[in-house]
Image: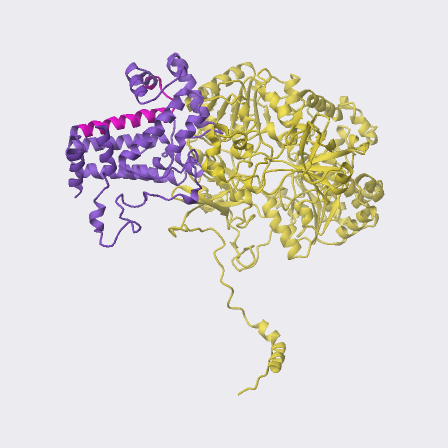
Amino acid sequence: MTTATLQKVTHDESGFSNDELVAECRARASVYRMLAGAFLEEPSAEYLNALRSAEAMATLQAMGVKFAGDFTDVPLAQLQEMLACEYAVLFVVAGGCPPVESIRLTGRYQQQPFFEARDFYKKHGFEISNGRFAVFEDQIGVELTFLAEMLERAAHHLESRDVESYTHLEKEIKRFWALHPGKWVRGYATLLERASEHSFYRQMGRLLGSFAEWELELLGVRVDDLDGGKLKVPKAEIEYEFDPDEPVCDACDKGRKDGDDLDAMLQTIDTSLIEKRIKGKA
Amino acid sequence: MLEMTRRTFLKISAGTTAAAVAVPKVLHAMENELGGKDFSPVTLAERLAIPTNCHVCNIQDGAIAFVENGRIVKLEGNPEHVSTRGRLCAKGNSGMWYTYDPDRILYPLKRVGARGEGKWKRISWDEALAEVAQKLDAAIKEDPNTICMKYGRNRSGGVIDRFMNTLGSATVINHTSVCESSKKIGMEPTWGPDIETPDFANAKYILNFGSNIMEAAYFHNPYSQRITEGVAENNAKLVTFDVRLSNTAGRSDEWIPVFPGTDGAVALAIGHVILRENLQDTDFIDTWCNVSTAELKAHYKQFTPEWASGLSGVPAETIERVAREFALTKPATTYTYRGPAKHLYGSYNEKATMMLSIMTGNVEKRGGYCMPRGMGWPQPQPEPPKPAHPSAMAHPHEYPLAGHKVSHLLPYFIAEGRQKINVHFSYQDNAVYTNPGAQAYWGKLYRDEKLIPYYVALTPFMGEEAALADLILPDCPYLERWEPESMPNSLWPWLGIRQPVIKSLGESRENRIMMRDIIWKMDPDGKRGMKQYWNFKDGEDYMRQHFDNVPGLKEAGGLDFLKKHGVWPIYGKLNPRTGKISDRTGREIVPEYGLHMKELSASDMTGTSVDGKGTIMKNGKAIGVRRNGKNYVGFPTGNRLINIRVDEWAKYGFNPMPTFKQIPWHKDMKDDEMVLTTYKINVHKQARTASVKWLAEIMHSNPVWMNTETGAKLGVKTGDLVRIESTVGHMVTKAYVFEGIHPKVVAIPTAFGHWEYGRLATLKLKEKEAGEFGATDDADLNNVWWEDKGVHPNAIIPTVVDPIGGSQGWYDTVVKVTKAGPNDKYGDVEGSWEKHLVAAKETMRYAYNGDLHRKMHPEMASWAGPASVKPGEGGGHH
């Protein structure tokens, strides 16, 4: 059943060939990495150079990202210094808004999201390897990097025609989105847009928010953003449409109907949104 | 069958009660575990329990951190800890929020804007260490003493001194003069130790001078337990002299309001009554003191109850009654903390109060006034030598008796150019908030790059001081670091540790590691001879060097024992029925009393000589005292006696006998003037708790207390804004009007009104729509229902120095209080750097070489003057 569904998506209705899906996975991974680079630590010269290349700027502009002169017209060394200071003020110094899930959802460092994210990475064979600075497992840059790695693997599975592994991985990506970034990055992105004084982080905030919306729709994951940055309703009224602790197939008691084949459902994913999105893009 | 009616049943019951009582009790109500274990409410799995010592404040309660899946989820008392017996106060229960504070500093930060502008850049440890090492090298080339270390709550077990000694600098400035130094100096030359350990639990009468011991003072948790036992189980009477109805005064049998700074006069008058009526313990005085009963009686004649009443406002008949009660009730003890000591002549006040326990012979008795019991530990070897040259700021020549230094004069000394500073460190010391003058004085000092060219703050939090630093090195909060510990907070000595209960967050490093790394950076190959003193792998290795060879502990397992239990020795088991420690037989453990009456052994006596006064000398040092043919160890003073007369004080023109000096500017106070005092409360410490969740919610504002009578006179009622003006500034705050304070006193608790220290302390999230950098969107801050962060009074409190003990006169500030005017708004605080400098200069006139010293001591007319004393002859702990 899984295979059939996937085949339907990849060949019959989306119009995307397997190669195109591979390319899309890698393209998405690339966006994840690019965004992660803005948050993991202070942007490096290489990163900024790459981002300020004509090609990258054109691509970003096409997506609606509009950096101001404080990003485009400043000598590289000066820009790097300015962004290092902005990074510290926004994410490191007291009174800032660290891009860390535990902080955003519980108000404290290293709480449940930290441990859950760490366990998630471990389950997939990843562990943190610090860059220039130590970083929390539930920092946005790490979460995005993890998703990029997962998409790389997904692309590899597609290339290998290992549909079962691809499907499993896609489920895990959905689960991770539902359990972690889906709960906070959209709200956080709006906050970042408001808080940043530099157009780089303002625009990265915009891009992060839009990309998160796009990904969630593409994946068919519906999860409320709990971050205060976007919170509009009292927390008590929030209800998960996608239960992150259950398989992604409405197999929970709440959604199951009499007579449903649970085992079969466990192997099924609702691909309608993905199909719709991919069709739209195509 | 027996015939029973209700009436016969009653008769039978009454007649058999005695027999029923005599039947052995084989059943008790089921008791839960008294701590030490905890379980996840979700999984029911037992949580990992790691013993440590609390360090939210400095009481050093035994604690257990419960860790679930790598996260600290709960703190509670360690039931094996003999002093605190499984109890932890509100502050201790909240300690994990330091670790997880969203405003915590986790990386080295380098200033990039102007000082205090708030612009920072994150740099690597390697960059930070290289920068510090370069600055230190340059400073050492000029003069090692240009490197200054100002520390606050230093429980590093000697690491700070090791660091400074390695650098060769003697410019080590503690914080004791804003804490309790005059209490220490009032006591040390008299009987040796710097503190007492009263046996409250077994006392029958407790005379408390100005200590809020059941809420905030040393040692709040263990002593609250013992006082409660004394009062509830032993029927002790608790009498408290205080300017305000503190939580301790409110729980006392009697609260006796007293005018600020006059506790000493009241104590002397109580002594007068005791000696006049021959209620003293003549045998104790004549055996153990350096002044005879007859001399004492003659000296105390001048301190009449009427005299003290005129100064203090305490009725003479109250003084007479309390004196008789105290002397005739045995055992009894006095207790003090900052109340009497934090005044211009606080050392005299402290001396006067401790005299009551001495003259009634309550010293080292069950239920009496005992010496502290502590334990030491060896330092890792080798140790660096002491610096070659003394520091003119660490031990100012004007205060030779102030063995615990005069830290709060630092801005004045630096401003006057007494000693140049090239590199300034602060370690757990937020002087910009906690010291007199605060932002107006210390803030100005720390901002000025001419006065302090390079400032490094060692701290996990962006306090008011760190915000002005050039470089911040992220220290660990207490649940992530190693430290040796011992405190005399009960009559049973103990050793303990703090140990990391989780791996430290981010890139924070504990004190000994970051200092080691600085030294290693300066001396990478050891050729400069510095590295040898920092020869340890990590914090645990350092602790092993402390603890693995302590006799007794070594046999028990050394550091491994402490890692498992948190404390050594284990005296017994916490009895669930009594809440006290019981030995193996089920009996409550009993401390050792009469430490001064321990007899010297034959080997101790080998090679000794005994002088005419009975002093037992060995190798030029007094090791004991002979009394009634027995050789006792006596008291840990230079002559092994209690020195009621402190000859060393006389050398500098101070009265060597118990005395009192009225604060000169309190003499002629106008009708509209009052004395401003400050105090601490149970859920906060001085500067470092305002951002701690739970504690901030419990108490976050600090209206000024004012007596009903005063309020009526000023037309002020609770909630009204008042303007409080001192000689150095003014503030505007809210009034709380009630009867629980002396009519001539206004009181403001500290710990509030922060302008730094994180989001909960500053409440900046409430100031603008999006808060500071979006802090308002922090999920947890949605629960912040309060909008009042309080007002901090220290900017309007001038520097006052006790010329003997060096203490700040926190409770000496004369203020004018008026209803706020149209231009006054809540939270206004203004202080003047220039006026604070003038105040510092003024208070130095009372120093032994100042022009007001003789005027204040007419009884010392025969003193030959300051020129008669060689510089550096001072006493105390240098």
Asked where in the image residue A84 lies, by quadrant, the reply is top left
The hue used for chain A is: purple
Q: Is B166 in front, or is B45?
A: B45
The hue used for chain B is: yellow
The coloring applied to the image is by chain
User: What is the magenta range?
Assistant: A20-47
Tell me if residue A35 is in the magenta stretch: yes
Residue at image location 18% in from the left, 38% down from the top: A6
B647 horizontally vs B195: left or right: right
Q: Name above or below for residue B575 compared with residue A72.
A: below
Q: Name above or below for residue B372 compared with residue A151.
A: below
Residue at image location 51% in from the left, 38% down from the top: B484
**Residue A166: x, y in percent?**
20, 36
Q: Name above or below for residue B445 compared with residue B253.
A: above
**Residue B604: x, y in percent?**
61, 42
Q: Is A13 in front, or is B415?
A: A13
Q: Is the magenta stretch mostly helix, strand or loop?
A: helix
* Residue A132 visible in the current orientation: no
**Residue B464: x, y in percent?**
56, 27
